[in-house]
Amino acid sequence: MAPQLLNAAALRPLLERRLVIVTGKGGTGKTSVAAALAVAGASSGRRVLVAEVGRDEHLPRLIAPGTAPVGYAGRELLPRLTAARIDPYAALGEYLGIQLHVRSAVELVLRNRAFRQLMDASPGWRELITLGKVWHYEQMRDPSGAPRFDLLVVDAPATGHGISFLDVPRVVVSAVRSGPLRRNAELVEEMIADRDRTLLLPVALAEELPARETAELVAKVRSELRISLDRIVVNALVARPFPPGLEDLDAKLARLPSEPLWPGLPPPPVIAACAAHLRSRYELNRVYLDEIARSTGLPVVPLPFLLSGIRGPEDLRRLAEALLAVPIAEAA
Ligand SMILES: Nc1ncnc2c1ncn2[C@@H]1O[C@H](COP(=O)(O)OP(=O)(O)OP(=O)(O)O)[C@@H](O)[C@H]1O
Ligand SMILES: [Mg+2]
């Protein structure tokens, strides 16, 4: 399918969605982006739930350094911001406990090794149960009947090429005729496919392989899933290294005599090599940022590379500022 071109300025702001599912390959910055979005949502007065999917917890410590793990039960880390970790086994226990009304028996079954081995080998249930838990959060109401959370941010597991995570409900709906499993899958599928409610937010890096993988991911989402996709976050872009008018600083340095300009300073060829390295990293990033915009036909949201990494609230604020800026429309 030819990429559709979207008007970047007309895009609905990220914070106006109800559910944002952050996805991408391993290490692209999903957790950092999810945390930044959650903090921005809470700062804007929204009640936010941010859920990290999987066994490990990285996200809470970015939002509140030094905090204890939040676990499956979750905890409010900042005013209006609750973080939780969705562990599929814990979600399964909760689900079965509700369905069977016998929590203690369920705990026993879940601890059973043979049962675990069977489940570890079974496809699909983790995805369905995880999304079921997200659906449950989305449905939560406070005593006044208002949604408990205005914005839900899901830090999804790293994608291979499969966004199988999101496809499982549809597969279940088409394979199972009736019963609670089908009903659950239908509700989850409805939530995922609702373009007003839900957005898939891929996070990519502006490098050759990640750029190609992002194009493949977008093509797959378009052809196989019904989830809305309206921009790509391109993370960790190196800043322009030299001020305007000095774009060829490395070339200028390379023309200087090779003796140090000042005692103790490295000789100009060394400084020139460093400068050339910086410039080439910057230029490569730009090439692949354009490539991602061109190959997907989607607006891109560039995020800066922060020299010290993403360690805490101040870094999240910097990411959030860029994340909420108007995306760049398709590159030339
Ligand atoms: N914009 C950035 N500038 C500098 N460092 C960054 C940036 N974004 C992320 N990082 C660093 O890159 C590493 C990976 O980031 P993060 O954990 O957010 O990625 P991830 O996609 O969630 O990884 P995983 O797939 O392992 O869950 C971290 O060390 C983080 O501090
Ligand atoms: Mg992560």
Image (cartoon, helix red, strand yellow):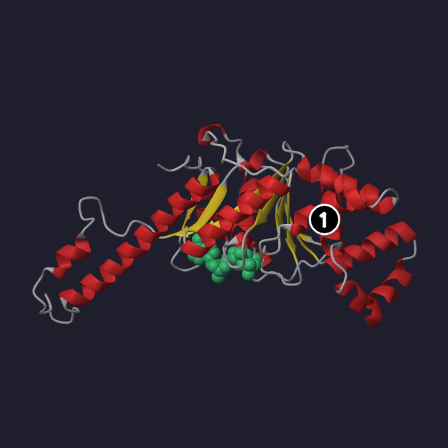
74, 330: nearer the viewer: 330
Quadrant holding ligand 2?
A: bottom right
Residue 245 pos. (x, y %)? 18, 44
Q: Which residue is identified by label 1?
A: 168
Residue 165 x %, y % = 67, 51
Which residue appears at 78% of the width and 42% of the height?
174
Q: Secondary structure at mark 1?
A: helix
Residue type, mark 1 in image? Val
Q: Is residue 36 visible?
A: no
Front residue of this view, candidates 38 and 326: 326
Q: At x 50% / y 32%, what residue is drawn?
A: 4
Hey, which quadrant is residue 122 in on the image? bottom right
Query: Which residue is at 50% across, 52% downward?
Result: 213
Q: Is residue 319 above or below residue 68?
A: above
Percent x, y of residue 12: 53, 31
Quarter holding the C terminus is top left
Crowding near the residue tagged with mark 1, few <14, some 14–19, many ≥20 C-alpha atoms within 10 Å? many
The location of residue 205, given as percent across then percent down, is 45, 52
